[in-house]
Image (cartoon, rainbow, N blue to C red):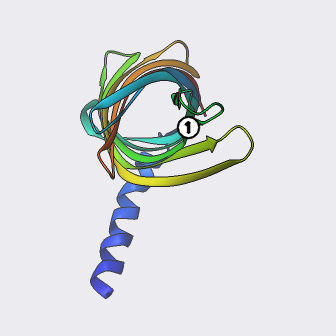
Amino acid sequence: MKKFAIAGAAAALFAIPAAANAEAFLQVETGLDSVSVSGDSDEGVNYGISAGYDLPLSGGMFVGIQGTVADSTVKECASDIFTAGDRLCVKTGRDLAAVVRLGTSVGEKSKLYVLGGYTNARIRATYTDGVNSASDGANGDGFRLGAGYQYDLSDRLFLKAEYRYSNYESDVSRHNAIVALGAKF
């Protein structure tokens, strides 16, 4: 246990100079959301917010963390043509993610990066028979991989384009093509 404490203290000492140049950020984002369940997919609009913290490394490299809270308009409904009023709908719910980003500066105003981490999404199902209705939801744990490009509009504002692939339990996956507008602090 002492070895871990000493290693942690040493890492913190090396991180102090870099932390002075670290940047926190907050962004609003939207884009295409394609959700696939057992090979069948539906598309919609993804929207949400992300916040993070980038720590510069040597040679123009950086490492960072990012947390995301998002939702989507993806929804699929089916009605029974033989029974009036029967309707089943499945809709994506909130999507939470925590990822690590690793990237490099490309010129003075641009960054390229890759990301990877954990994601948890919710799917909700509702059923009505025309008189009564019921709903239920389930969460799926998974991993997220992606890559992105960030362009600084000014010292504080940036634009971002990002691709994300998420894979969840029960043969559910998701592809996102995101654009974001953010501010650095």
Residue at (27, 82) in percent of width and height:
3
Image quadrant containing the C terminus? top right
Residue 134 vs residue 3, the one in the foreground: 134
Left or right: 59 with respect to 149? left
Q: How many residues crowd around disc 1 within 10 Å: few (fewer than 14), some, or many (20 or more)? A: some
Whether residue 61 is visible, yes or no, is no
Q: Where is residue 2 shown, x and y percent of the image?
A: 32, 87
Residue 32 image position (x, y, % from top left): 45, 20
Q: Is residue 94 left or right of residue 1?
A: right
The quarter of the picture where residue 184 lies is: top right
Location of residue 36 in the rendering, given as x and y in whole percent from the top left corner = 34, 33
Identify which residue, 141 or 172, lies in the foreground.
172
Which one is nearer the viewer's eye here, 109 or 96? 96
* Image location (x, y in percent) of residue 123: 51, 45
Residue found at the far top of this picture: 153
Badge 1 is on which residue? 88
Residue 130: quarter of image: top right
Image vertical order of residue 185 relative to residue 7, above or below: above
Q: Tag 1: residue type?
A: Leu
